[in-house]
Amino acid sequence: GENVEQHPSTLSVQEGDSAVIKCTYSDSASNYFPWYKQELGKGPQLIIDIRSNVGEKKDQRIAVTLNKTAKHFSLHITETQPEDSAVYFCAASIEDDKIIFGKGTRLHILP
Amino acid sequence: DAGVTQSPTHLIKTRGQHVTLRCSPISGHKSVSWYQQVLGQGPQFIFQYYEKEERGRGNFPDRFSARQFPNYSSELNVNALLLGDSALYLCASMRTRSTDTQYFGPGTRLTVL
């Protein structure tokens, strides 16, 4: 079955700098790659997603890239702000039926 | 529009007991999925229901069961609770079965003593 590896597990970034989180997946049939942000005591919130027919997608300060050949995908957050501090999860699925999550990255934005 | 709602928010049970967790999807969404999130880990898929039928099952024992009602709300049942069942249980709704985005509820925090 699908396996998603995510790193780093913890990331500290100075406010205003960029943060990058990287993931790999194992099942070449996966075609949908969402990213979720989870704040303490809340459920995961979708922040951006990308499908396999696209190599890059951007939404304001957030961008995601996908390399299907290498089975890599990454989240880029630019101009980080204190409210970006949270746990971020990458995930992969086939036709959205069952989402397989990575173990998460705890992002700290330092003042 | 209201998001995915779950009840209760918190629950404490003892080993061997049974628990029922409830989920109401976003209005217009017909698919509900359940996930278990152990502290410090990513959510793990338990079940997906679409149009009141089970469409997918993760690697969980038969003590876990679920159902979906005509109004598309759903219940997750866990029998013979074990300490290891302590987790945040998340419900996610989706408009259809596939090609759409899953939106998560706030979860139910289950503690088994």
Image (cartoon, grey):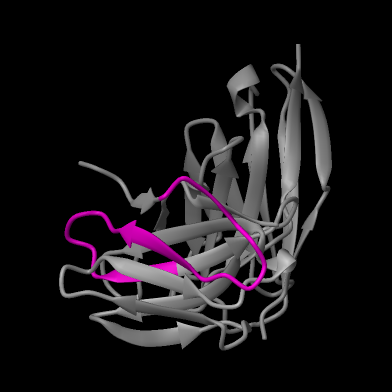
State the image coordinates of residue A77 (x, y, percent, origin top left): 63, 34
In the rendered structure, which segment of residues is drawn in magenta? B8-33
Q: Is residue A71 above or below residue B13?
A: below
Q: Nearer the viewer, residue A61 or B75?
A: B75
Question: Where A20 sits versus B51, above or below?
Answer: above
In the rendered image, the quadrant that contains the N terminus of chain B is: top left
**Which quadrant: the C terminus of chain B?**
bottom right
- x, y (%) of residue B103? 39, 54
Identify which residue is drawn at 42% across, 49% down.
B8
Name the residue rendered at 59%, 36% in the picture. A39
Q: Is residue B104 above or below residue B29?
A: above
The one nearer the camera, B96 or A22, is B96
Q: Residue at x 36, y 69 (%)?
A: B75
Q: Is residue B71 left or right of residue B97?
A: left
B66 vs A8, nearest the viewer: B66
User: Looking at the rendering, which quadrant does residue A68 occupy?
Assistant: bottom right
Quarter assignment of residue B85: bottom right
Residue at screen point 61% across, 35% down? A40
Q: Is residue B100 at least partly visible in the picture?
A: yes
Give percent across and percent down for residue A42: 52, 40
Q: Is residue B96 left or right of residue A55?
A: left
Q: Quadrant of residue B82?
A: bottom right
